[in-house]
Image (cartoon, helix red, strand yellow):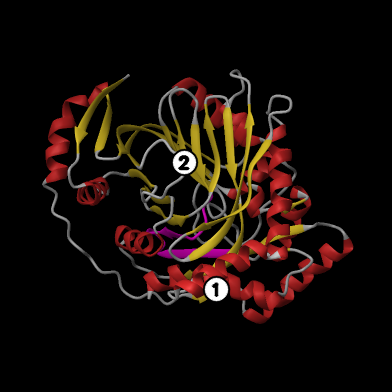
C-alpha cells in the first residue's frame, strides 16, 4: 500500500530539475519526461521513480514468464526495461554480436518513492514503510542546490565504416530483391572506450536539444540510459492498446518556408510512406494476437509530427483486449516492435543479426512502467546514449529502414542525421 499526497508546484521546470538531481543519490532511478509535447494519449507530464523495494533482473531465458510472475504477484507500480534481445525468448533466435555494455536483458523494480507530474501539481506516492520521509524529502528537494558539472569531450568511434555500411545495406537489398524480406531496420553503433561522463548532465543536454515526448533518464547502479526518444512502442489504457510506430524522417530548417517544404515533401514521399505502411501492417498483425475480434483499427496513417530536430511520419494503430488478458502477454506477442525489426519479422531479425556487428541490447528495446491496475506505457529506445560507468564504455546506435527503393548512400546520411544530437552533446 502507498501513502498518496499532492503538492502544488509553482516553478515546474525548476522543481523538476531539483528533483532529478536529488534522485541521482539513489541506486535505481527512472525519470520519464513528455516535455509538454501535445499528445492524445498521455497520463502524466513526467514521472520519477526511485529506490527499489523489490526488483527483477534476468537474462532472456524465460524472461517474459519471470516478468509475468513478478508483475502479477506485485500488483504495484513497476518501472524498468526490456532489451531487444528478449526476441530470443519468444523465437528461435540468438544474439552473438559484440556487447561492450553488459546490461541485464531485463530489469524492473518496484519503487519505494514515486512522483507523478500533471500540470502544476505533483502526486507523491511512497510505500507505507517509508511514508514518514515524504515531508523531509520534499523540503530537501525544494532546497536542493543544483551544480553544473561539465563532462569532458568524448572521442567517438564508428563501429562500421561508411564503405562497410554501404556494402552491408547492398547485401540487405539482395535479400529484399530475392524475396526473403520486404523491409528491415539496419543499425550501426558509435562508441567510446575509457569514457568518463556526468550522465545527468549529458541527459539534460540531449533532452534540451530534442525535447521529445518519451525522454528517459535511467540509472541502475553503474548502468545508464540517456534517451531522447520520440517514439511510443505500446500503451494500455483499460481494454485499449495503442501502438505508434515511426517510419519516415526528414531534416528541419530554420527557414520557415523551407521547413514547411521539408514537411510536405515527407508527407508525399512514396518510399517513406511505403515503409510506414509495411510496419503498420506488421503492428496490426502483432496486435491481433491478443485483440478481441474486429477491434484492430488504424486511427492515423502516415501523419507528420514535428520535433525540434526532425519531422517524423507516425501512424497510430489500436486494438481492444479482454479484461482477463495479461499485460505481459500483450507485450510478449508484439515484441520487439515492428519499427525496429522489419517484415516478415522473424526473417528480418535473422538477417539483421548476421549483418549488424553489435548486440543491440537495450537499444531498440523499451523502457516504461506498469500501473497497479495492469495498464502500461512503453517507449522505443532510440536517439539514446547508453553508458556503463564501471567499465567506462559508452555507446549509441542509429538505424534506418531498408526497402527495395533504398539507396545505401541516402540511408547512411539518414543515420548521421539521427546521430547528430548525440554527437553534439558528447563533443
Pick the residue in front: 134 or 287: 287
Look at the image and say whether residue 420 sits in the magenta stretch.
Answer: no
Q: Which mark is residue 368?
A: 2
110 shown above or below 344 = above
Of residue 24 and residue 247, the one placed in the foreground of this image is 247
Compared with 278, 132 (above or below) is: above
Indicate the quadrant containing the C terminus: top left, top right, bottom left or bottom right: bottom left
In this picture, which residue range is highlighted in magenta? Answer: 380-398
Q: Position of residue 301 (x, y in %)?
A: 65, 49
Q: Which mark is residue 416?
A: 1
First in sequence, mark 1 or 2: give its number.
Answer: 2
Residue 307 visible from this viewpoint:
yes
Q: Is the N terminus in the top left, top right, bottom left or bottom right quadrant?
A: top left
Residue 192: x and y in percent read 45, 71
Left or right of residue 7: residue 95: right
Secondary structure at badge 2 equals strand
Residues under labels 1 and 2: Cα distance?
A: 27 Å
Give the crowd class for mark 2: few <14, some 14-19, many >=20 residues within 10 Å. many
- Residue located 43% across and 50% down the image: 213
Q: Answer yes or no: is residue 401 visible.
A: no
Amino acid at each position: 500500500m502507498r501513502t498518496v499526497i499532492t503538492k502544488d508546484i509553482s516553478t515546474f521546470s525548476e522543481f523538476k530539475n531539483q528533483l532529478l538531481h536529488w534522485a541521482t543519490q539513489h541506486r535505481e532511478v527512472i525519470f520519464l519526461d513528455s516535455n509538454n509535447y501535445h499528445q492524445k494519449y498521455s497520463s502524466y507530464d513526467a514521472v520519477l521513480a526511485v529506490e527499489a523495494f523489490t526488483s527483477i533482473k534476468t537474462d532472456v531465458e524465460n524472461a517474459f514468464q519471470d516478468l509475468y510472475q513478478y508483475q502479477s504477484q506485485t500488483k504495484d507500480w513497476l518501472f524498468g526495461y526490456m532489451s531487444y534481445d528478449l526476441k530470443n525468448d519468444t523465437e528461435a533466435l540468438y544474439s552473438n554480436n559484440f556487447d561492450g555494455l553488459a546490461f541485464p536483458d531485463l530489469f524492473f523494480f518496484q519503487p519505494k518513492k514515486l512522483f507523478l507530474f500533471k500540470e502544476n501539481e505533483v502526486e507523491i506516492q511512497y510505500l507505507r514503510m517509508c511514508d514518514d520521509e515524504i515531508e523531509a524529502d520534499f523540503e530537501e528537494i525544494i532546497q536542493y542546490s543544483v551544480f553544473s558539472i561539465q563532462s569532458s569531450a568524448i572521442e567517438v568511434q564508428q563501429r562500421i565504416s561508411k564503405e562497410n555500411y554501404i556494402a552491408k545495406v547492398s547485401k540487405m537489398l539482395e535479400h529484399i530483391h530475392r524475396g526473403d524480406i520486404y523491409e528491415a531496420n539496419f543499425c550501426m553503433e558509435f562508441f567510446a572506450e575509457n569514457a568518463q561522463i556526468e550522465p545527468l548532465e549529458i541527459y539534460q543536454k540531449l533532452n534540451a536539444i530534442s525535447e521529445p515526448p518519451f525522454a528517459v533518464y535511467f540509472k541502475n547502479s553503474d548502468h545508464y540510459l540517456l534517451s531522447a526518444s520520440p517514439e511510443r512502442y505500446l500503451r494500455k489504457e483499460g481494454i485499449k492498446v495503442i501502438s505508434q510506430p515511426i517510419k519516415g524522417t526528414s531534416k528541419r530548417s530554420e527557414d520557415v518556408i523551407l521547413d514547411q517544404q521539408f514537411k510536405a515533401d515527407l508527407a508525399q514521399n512514396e518510399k517513406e510512406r511505403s515503409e510506414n505502411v509495411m510496419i503498420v501492417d506488421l503492428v496490426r498483425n502483432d496486435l491481433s494476437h491478443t485483440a478481441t475480434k474486429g477491434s484492430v483499427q488504424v486511427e492515423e496513417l502516415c501523419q507528420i509530427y514535428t520535433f525540434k530536430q526532425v519531422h517524423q511520419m507516425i501512424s497510430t494503430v489500436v486494438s481492444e483486449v479482454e479484461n482477463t488478458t495479461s499485460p505481459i502477454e500483450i507485450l510478449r506477442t508484439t515484441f520487439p516492435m515492428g519499427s525496429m525489426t522489419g517484415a516478415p519479422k522473424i526473417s528480418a531479425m535473422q538477417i539483421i543479426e548476421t549483418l549488424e556487428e553489435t548486440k543491440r541490447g537495450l537499444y531498440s528495446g523499451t523502457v516504461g512502467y506498469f500501473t497497479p491496475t495492469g495498464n502500461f506505457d512503453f517507449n522505443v529506445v532510440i536517439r539514446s546514449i547508453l553508458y556503463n560507468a564501471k567499465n567506462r564504455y559508452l555507446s549509441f546506435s542509429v538505424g534506418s529502414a531498408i526497402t527495395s527503393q533504398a539507396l545505401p548512400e541516402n540511408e547512411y546520411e539518414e543515420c548521421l542525421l539521427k546521430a547528430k544530437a548525440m554527437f553534439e552533446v558528447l563533443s
